[in-house]
Image (cartoon, coloured by chain):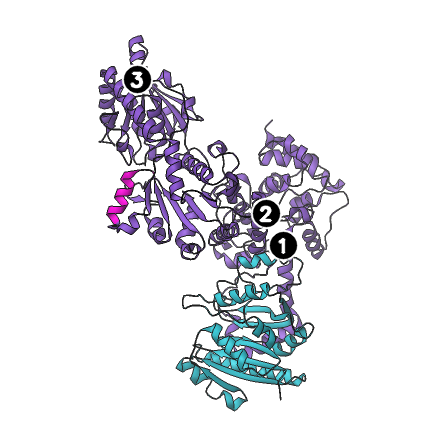
């Protein structure tokens, strides 16, 4: 059976906190199933550290499908995650973060309005390592939004929810080793705008991460 | 009566509710008004005729008086920190209201202030205290600190929506009563009724609404559930960071518009050459930027060249640049923007113009662009830079573009242009530079400005006529130029008049005209060396502590004046014992005195040296040679 949503947790060197991220994805998947969606949870170990592998070692016992690749570059890993997903929609999640429990079904509801052109983001990004820091990404439908600002800094990170076809049409760039955290998300943002995609927000949803990337400004 | 007293009286008479009118306003209220007046915001609401009536840069007193006389009754805003709707809402929370006929802002000054009502969304007293605990001992209401200090200094964060500006300091903001957030507040001013609100205030209100959403049951429940898994997300024991919420209250949005407007202002879609200059004021580098631009224009076409002003919004000498070349004042549009956004904006602008080459002429931002993003940028355009001299700090240590920035940029530069051979040799030697790199270093003799002036023999004529000995000195009264030596020379030669032209530019020395010897006359600024009364001087004195080949020496040489000059930098390439009177003991006033006495002791010999010098510079420093060298550098011209 083809899933409605593939929730793919991409893990590299996050260590024990990857377990918390997986817990959050499983909760979100359960909530989405309660709302009537067929959800598969995939854990992708992308050249993962031993600590990360240990943290996620029993993912399959929680109903997740485990995939492993020897590449740690996040762009390549995300593209692999999309290729490995069976769902009509793919939610890319990061093992260093935590999604709110309503994320999958709320994002699905937004994407369904225009699945071929929509990339969905949480309403609130909540960073907490340096003290709580709230980031409210823009909805592209906001009349004050100017796409030119993306040349000066990124607006959206890549913890996204979009149709698998969208991800395949606009693959994630694969950057060299010198790229800084957030550069990949920024590059993908620019590519999606160039491709005419629309970035929208799912109300009442949050993403929690330790640190705001430099490029998200 | 002083102007401040006039508006204080006006304040007492300005329309207010009958009950309030009976009360004589306290000096406190007058003082509060003064703290709150922001001329640039007020002027933005006036007609062009009203602004003209007020003068170019009216001060706080003039604006306060105009506001009380005209603006208050029309509902104009004189303070960036009074938002009428916010005041109304917060006043209601205190079960208070503004009596009919009373001006809301004046009501706040009299009444709201006493109730500690913050009348703006831009400031949050609790946030301010939490983030700046040092202010817990501030002797007044904490808003007073923000009004009088915090809004003019970048380190103070007034609200959960952040600083409201890009974070760049402005040392004169406080003096001008120009809060750092004003560029944001005046952004898209044509889309807002500034009497009521602004782009910035609407944006901050949007941020505050988004933050308030976290208290909604749905979001609060999600947060609580996530915190079960990750208690650390509440970041206990740490203060909260400001929220960011594009597009509102977000620098990138304003900058995107500024960039688009800058391109439109330039009126060019694509150019061959971009010349980056810091500003255009009294300096030799500005003149070289002009002649370089002229040479590039001659090799291509003026409409294929754009000059971008990057560091300071000053362009005092447009005549230095050829007609037809577009000049873009990017510095003005970058007001209030800190790094790295400034650098990134310049990068975006340069890339959007798709030039074949970018030439940096003393632009600090340009050097930062090349050193930090040069690896990427040099893939799409050739990068070049001009070097004149290093600077020297108070301890005598060299710094400046030929030191750090060159080291970080050299590998990205297709050419490095130098105005003196000595600097080229010094760099080659220091780096043990291989031949392939040396080949990218080009010494170009800065061409003389066109001038018909020829005062050859003036010394002999004046000595024969028995005129008083008069020494000419011209330049910036800055530390580099060593005007202190001129003062000592004047004291050692009390019978010699020294006429000094110029002005302080960097303000890095204390110069008190009252302390100068009587035989020094400050003659004020000049516009071109050839406009000086050269036939009324016996010689030119040059005293710089460091330099390339200075324009003033070349211009003196061109005129036929005998020259006494410090033998620094590239000066010995021009002033030799055959052509003038070089002073090698450059810090010693007596050495200049000896040189001047030697010169005056042999007017015929001095005239011969000056004539030789004049002939050489007219032979070697020509526009034709310079243009030819630049054209060769560009590959023989453009299609």
Between B249 and B26, which is closer to the camera in this rendering? Answer: B249
Q: Mark 1 belongs to which subunit?
A: B
Corner quadrant of residue B291: top left
Between B109 and A191, which is closer to the camera in this rendering? Answer: A191
Q: Nearer the viewer, mark 1 or mark 2?
A: 2
Quadrant (top left, top right, bottom left, bottom right) of the N terminus of chain B? top right
Q: CA distance from mark 3 to mark 2?
A: 55 Å
Disc 1 on helix, strand or loop? loop
Disc on res. B536: none
Give left or right: position of B506 versus B579: right
Q: Nearer the viewer, mark 3 or mark 1?
A: 3
Q: Which residue is identified by label 3?
A: B496
Task: Judge whether residue B562 is colored magenta.
Answer: no
Chain letter for cyan?
A: A
| Tags 1 and 2 both on a single chain | yes
Residue visible at 56% across and 76% down in the picture? A99
Q: CA distance from mark 3 to mark 1?
A: 65 Å
Q: Mark 3 belongs to which subunit?
A: B
Q: Position of residue A59 (x, y in %)?
A: 50, 87
Task: Judge whether residue B425 is colored magenta.
Answer: yes
3 or 2: tag closer to the N-terminus? 2
Disc 3 on helix, strand or loop? loop
Q: Residues within 10 Å of mark 1 (few under 14, many from 20)?
A: many
Disc on res. B261: 2
Q: Is residue B169 above or below residue A40?
A: above
Q: Residues within 10 Å of mark 3 (few under 14, many from 20)?
A: some
What is the magenta range? B419-430
Q: Mark 2 belongs to which subunit?
A: B
Residue visible at 30% across and 36% down in the picture? B546
Q: Is the magenta region chiefly helix, strand or loop?
A: helix
Q: Which residue is identified by label 1?
A: B121
């Amino acid at each position: 059976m083809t899933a409605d949503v593939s929730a793919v947790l991409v893990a590299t060197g996050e260590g024990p906190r990857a377990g918390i991220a997986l817990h959050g994805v499983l909760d979100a998947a359960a909530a989405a199933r309660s709302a009537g969606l067929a959800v598969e949870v995939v854990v992708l170990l992308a050249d993962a550290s031993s600590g990360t592998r240990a943290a996620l070692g029993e993912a399959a016992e929680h109903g997740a499908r485990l995939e492993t690749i020897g590449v740690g570059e996040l762009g390549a890993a995300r593209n692999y995650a999309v290729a490995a997903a069976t769902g009509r929609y793919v939610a890319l999640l990061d093992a260093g973060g935590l999604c709110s429990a309503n994320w999958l079904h709320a994002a699905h509801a937004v994407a369904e309005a225009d699945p071929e052109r929509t990339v969905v983001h949480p309403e609130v990004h909540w960073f907490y390592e340096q003290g709580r820091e709230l980031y409210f990404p823009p909805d592209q439908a906001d009349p004050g939004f100017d796409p030119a600002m993306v040349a000066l800094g990124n607006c959206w990170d890549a913890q996204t929810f979009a149709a698998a076809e969208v991800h395949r049409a606009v693959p994630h760039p694969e950057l060299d080793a010198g790229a800084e955290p957030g550069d990949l998300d920024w590059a993908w943002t620019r590519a999606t705008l160039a491709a005419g995609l629309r970035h929208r927000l799912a109300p009442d949803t949050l993403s929690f991460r330790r640190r705001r990337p430099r490029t998200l400004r | 009566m002083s102007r401040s007293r006039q508006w204080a009286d006006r304040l007492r008479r300005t329309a207010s509710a009958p009950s309030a009118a009976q009360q004589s306003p306290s000096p406190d209220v007058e003082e509060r008004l003064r703290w709150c007046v922001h001329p640039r915001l007020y002027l933005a609401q006036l007609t062009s005729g009203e602004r003209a009536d007020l003068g170019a840069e009216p001060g706080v007193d003039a604006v306060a008086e105009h506001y009380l006389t005209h603006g208050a009754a029309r509902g104009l805003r004189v303070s960036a920190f009074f938002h009428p709707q916010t005041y109304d809402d917060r006043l209601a929370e205190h079960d208070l209201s503004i009596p009919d006929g009373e001006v809301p802002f004046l009501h706040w000054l009299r009444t709201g202030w006493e109730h500690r009502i913050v009348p703006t969304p831009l400031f949050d007293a609790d946030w301010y205290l939490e983030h700046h605990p040092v202010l817990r001992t501030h002797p007044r209401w904490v808003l007073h600190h923000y009004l009088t200090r915090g809004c003019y200094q970048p380190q103070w964060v007034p609200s959960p929506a952040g600083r409201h500006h890009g974070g760049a300091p402005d040392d004169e903001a406080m003096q001008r009563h120009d809060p750092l957030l004003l560029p944001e507040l005046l952004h898209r001013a044509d889309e807002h009724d500034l009497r009521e609100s602004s782009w910035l205030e609407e944006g901050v209100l949007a941020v505050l609404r988004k933050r308030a959403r976290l208290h909604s049951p749905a979001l609060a429940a999600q947060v609580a559930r996530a915190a079960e898994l990750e208690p650390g997300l509440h970041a206990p024991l740490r203060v909260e960071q400001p929220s960011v919420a594009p597009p509102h209250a977000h620098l990138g949005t304003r900058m995107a518009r500024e960039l688009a407007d800058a391109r439109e202002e330039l009126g060019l879609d694509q150019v061959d050459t971009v010349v980056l200059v810091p500003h255009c004021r009294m300096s030799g580098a500005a003149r070289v930027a002009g002649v370089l631009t002229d040479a590039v224009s001659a090799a291509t076409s003026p409409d294929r060249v754009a000059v971008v002003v990057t560091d300071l919004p000053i362009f005092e000498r447009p005549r230095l640049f050829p007609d037809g070349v577009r000049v873009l004042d990017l510095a003005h549009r970058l007001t209030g923007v800190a790094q790295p956004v400034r650098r990134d904006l310049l990068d975006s602008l340069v890339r959007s113009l798709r030039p074949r080459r970018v030439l940096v002429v003393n632009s600090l931002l340009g050097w930062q662009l090349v050193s930090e993003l040069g690896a990427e940028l040099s893939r799409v355009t050739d990068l070049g830079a001009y070097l004149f001299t290093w600077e020297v700090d108070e301890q005598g240590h060299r710094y400046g573009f030929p030191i750090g920035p060159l080291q970080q940029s050299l590998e990205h530069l297709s050419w490095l242009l130098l105005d003196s051979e000595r600097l080229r040799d010094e760099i080659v030697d220091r780096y043990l530079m291989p031949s392939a790199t040396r080949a990218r270093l080009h010494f170009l003799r800065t061409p003389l400005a066109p001038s018909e002036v020829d005062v050859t023999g003036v010394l002999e004529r004046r000595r024969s006529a028995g005129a008083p000995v008069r020494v000419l000195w011209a330049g910036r009264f800055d530390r580099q130029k060593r005007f202190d030596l001129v003062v000592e020379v004047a004291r050692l030669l009390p019978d010699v008049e020294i006429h000094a032209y110029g002005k302080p530019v960097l303000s890095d020395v204390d110069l008190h005209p009252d302390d100068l010897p009587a035989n020094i006359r400050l003659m004020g600024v000049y516009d071109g060396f050839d406009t000086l009364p050269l036939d009324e001087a016996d010689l030119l004195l040059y005293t710089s502590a460091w330099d390339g080949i200075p324009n003033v020496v070349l211009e003196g040489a061109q005129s036929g004046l005998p020259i006494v000059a410090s033998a620094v930098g590239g000066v010995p390439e021009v002033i030799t014992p055959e052509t003038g009177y070089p002073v090698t003991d450059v810090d010693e006033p007596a050495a200049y005195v000896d040189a001047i006495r030697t010169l005056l002791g042999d007017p015929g010999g001095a005239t011969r040296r000056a004539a030789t010098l004049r002939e050489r510079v007219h032979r070697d420093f020509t526009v034709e040679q310079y243009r030819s060298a630049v054209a060769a550098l560009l590959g023989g011209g453009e299609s």
